[in-house]
Image (cartoon, rainbow, N blue to C red):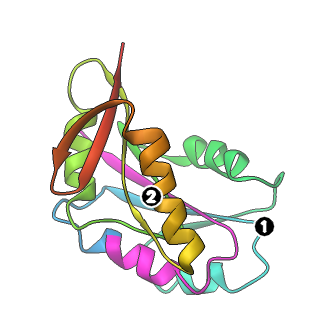
Amino acid sequence: MKVSVLIIAHNEGHHIGECIESLLFQTRKPNEIILINHNSSDDTGAVARGYPVRVIDYEGPHGPEHARIKGFEEVKSDIILCIDGDAIAHRKWIETMSDILAEPGVVMAGSWIRMKGNWFLHLASWRWYLLTAFPHFCRRSDVGSEFRASW
């Protein structure tokens, strides 16, 4: 199955390089990496263009949900993995997430990632994990806890 990684970034010029590098050095390479640079006023797009990723400058309605929808319209793969521009993916993130999503009946998966920046963002990483991933169907792996939603 083909895998696309969709990066949603708004004014992430300080972090986007590290985010992209964490995706380029995965144990399983994605078929494409697309960055939706939505309404940024900093150098996010310029930094991202220094890497082998497709950058789409999106000047639509504010909010990551609008940028994510734009990204869904652009991907060309069976599996879509989303990450924010200020997050760092574990080295086996693509491998683990795509294996889970390739299982029959699995339509959604999530994992704990590390957000870059100040202490508040690190706390937000743990908040997301505790409120979203932990209460659902969990299993342990070397990437943290994943949750799965099956129909």
Of the pair 125 and 38, the residue shown nearer to us: 125
- x and y, in percent, of residue 91 in the image: 22, 67
- Which amino acid type is marked by label 2? Trp
Say which residue appears at 49% left-offset and 42% top-offset: 131
Viewport quadrant of the N terminus: top left
Q: Residue 77: in sight, yes or no?
A: no
Viewport quadrant of the C terminus: top left
Residue at which label 2 appears: 126
| Left or right position of 4 against 64 | left
Say which residue appears at 28% left-offset and 34% top-offset: 101
Of the pair 1 and 81, the residue shown nearer to us: 81
- x and y, in percent, of residue 118 in the image: 57, 81
The image quarter containing residue 134 is top left
Q: Which residues are magenta?
A: 1-22
Q: Residue 117: in sight, yes or no?
A: yes
74 is higher (above) or lower (below) than 85 = above
22 is higher (above) or lower (below) than 36 = below
Mark 2 touches mark 1? (CB < 8 Å): no
Residue at which label 1 appears: 39
The image quarter containing residue 23 is bottom left
User: How many C-alpha atoms fall within 10 Å of the one at disc 2: few (<14), some, or many (≥20)?
Assistant: some
Q: Nearer the viewer, mark 2 or mark 1?
A: 2
- Which amino acid type is marked by label 1? Asn
